């Protein structure tokens, strides 16, 4: 076995606070993660676990195959669509401040859309992928300019009325964040990086990468095994552009498990993302987070995070009134970019949560299976 291969399977595990049965937890994480790395040729994975407020970190392999730099709990990974939960928190923060309403229509802040079909949808529709069928990705012909975006939105032809179908969509979530930024008269970058993240104790999470953080930024690896990183594009900040470490992201998970000690506006923002608005099959869609009544089976989690849910048109039902936040819920979100993948899940009732970050995109079902097996062991203790 080559030196690089040996590094890829080596563990650098660090527990900042011990969890009961730490040796057993190490074994469970090893058993969940090592086979994934081998089967899918994943260079590096970072795992962080929280149980009853205590943290453990497990770091595997390398952040760069070229340099051989090891993954640590401070290595920065691209979060992909887990970024959507940060956009949702930002929008909920604006709602908590009274600067916008989820019932607002986009033309209130983008008057160029007045009278267009897309203006029948609301901020809530954009945040829950129920605006009428906006596509998964921004179409190739739409340039990375506000003028091009507005022209596309003015001419958009919905496939259904708002509230009727769920079509998972980066442009939908992008518009969700963009409208909120206009309402708050501040960029999403500034709202998150200067106002929200510091109040969550997150100092290693970025929407725009500073040069000082580049040494900790992992390289991702695509299907051709080429080193890649994402490019900034239209709605990338809102939909998939956050970079973070397992150590920082698990703090975010802890804030979601128990927001009671947070500054009041941030607490209301977090709590607002836990309300359920639409039911699609086994999935209840909140703002950013997707929800499942707890206890939940592995099969239901994999079904709710399947390609059918992310790539097909699915009939949906609006919950009226919205479903109140419940601690007996499995909250989760998956994410990926061209060279990275992620999965985050937590159950407030059990005070358990997990972050799994990797510098290769491997199957979602495998991420969920790994997280499920690790968390199941924690709740059994």
Image (cartoon, rainbow, N blue to C red):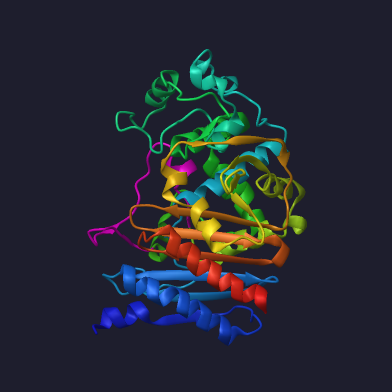
Height in image: 191 above or below 346?
Answer: above
- Is residue 189 found inside the magenta-colored segment of the image? no
Q: Where, by quadrant of the figure, is residue 236 drawn? A: top left
Q: Which residues are magenta?
A: 218-243
**Secondary structure mostly seen in the magenta stretch:** loop
Q: Position of residue 294 (x, y in %)?
A: 67, 59
Height in image: 210 above or below 143?
Answer: below
- Is residue 230 found inside the magenta-colored segment of the image? yes
Height in image: 228 above or below 141?
Answer: below
Q: Position of residue 233 (x, y in %)?
A: 37, 40
Q: Is residue 37 left or right of residue 194?
A: left
Image quarter of the N terminus? bottom left
Which residue is located at x 57 percent, y 55 percent? Answer: 332
Residue at the extreme top of the image, as rendered: 115
Q: Position of residue 234 (x, y in %)?
A: 40, 36
One can see residue 245 in this view: no
One can see residue 222 in this view: yes
Q: Position of residue 132 (x, y in %)?
A: 50, 27
Closer to the camera in the image, 372 or 117 = 372
Closer to the camera in the image, 177 or 82 = 82
Which residue is located at x 59 percent, y 70 percent? Answer: 375
């Amino acid at each position: 076995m080559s030196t690089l291969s040996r590094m890829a399977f080596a563990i650098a595990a660090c527990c900042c606070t011990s969890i009961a049965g730490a040796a057993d937890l190490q074994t469970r994480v090893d058993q969940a993660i090592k086979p994934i790395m081998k089967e899918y040729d994943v260079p590096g994975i970072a795992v962080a676990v929280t149980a009853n407020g205590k943290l453990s970190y497990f770091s595997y392999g390398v952040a760069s195959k070229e340099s051989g730099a090891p993954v640590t709990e401070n290595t920065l990974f691209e979060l992909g669509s887990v970024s959507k939960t940060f956009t949702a928190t930002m929008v909920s923060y604006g709602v908590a401040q009274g600067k916008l309403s989820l019932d607002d229509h986009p033309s209130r802040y983008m008057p160029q859309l007045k009278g267009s079909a897309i203006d029948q949808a609301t901020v809530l529709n954009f945040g829950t992928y129920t605006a009428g069928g906006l596509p998964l990705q921004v179409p190739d012909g739409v340039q990375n300019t506000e003028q091009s975006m507005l022209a596309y939105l003015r001419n958009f032809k919905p496939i259904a009325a708002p509230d009727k179908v769920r079509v998972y969509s980066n442009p939908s979530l992008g518009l969700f964040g963009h409208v909120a930024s206009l309402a708050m008269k501040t960029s999403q970058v500034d709202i998150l990086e200067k106002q929200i993240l510091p109040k969550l104790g997150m100092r290693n999470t970025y929407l725009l990468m500073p040069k000082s953080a580049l040494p900790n930024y992992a390289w991702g690896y695509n299907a051709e095994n080429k080193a890649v990183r994402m490019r900034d594009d239209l709605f990338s900040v809102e939909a998939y552009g956050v970079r973070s470490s397992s150590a920082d992201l698990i703090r975010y998970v802890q804030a979601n498990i128990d927001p009671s000690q947070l500054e009041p506006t941030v607490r209301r923002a977090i709590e607002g993302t836990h309300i359920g608005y639409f039911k699609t099959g086994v999935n209840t869609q909140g703002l950013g987070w997707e929800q499942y009544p707890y206890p939940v089976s592995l099969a239901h989690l994999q079904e709710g995070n399947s390609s059918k849910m992310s790539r097909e048109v699915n009939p949906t039902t609006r919950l009226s009134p919205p479903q109140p936040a419940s601690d007996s819920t499995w909250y989760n979100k998956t994410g990926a970019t061209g060279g990275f993948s992620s999965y985050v899940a937590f159950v407030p009732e059990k005070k358990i949560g997990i972050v799994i970050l990797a510098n290769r995109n491997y199957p979602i079902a495998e991420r969920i299976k790994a997280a499920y097996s690790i968390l199941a062991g924690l709740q059994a203790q």
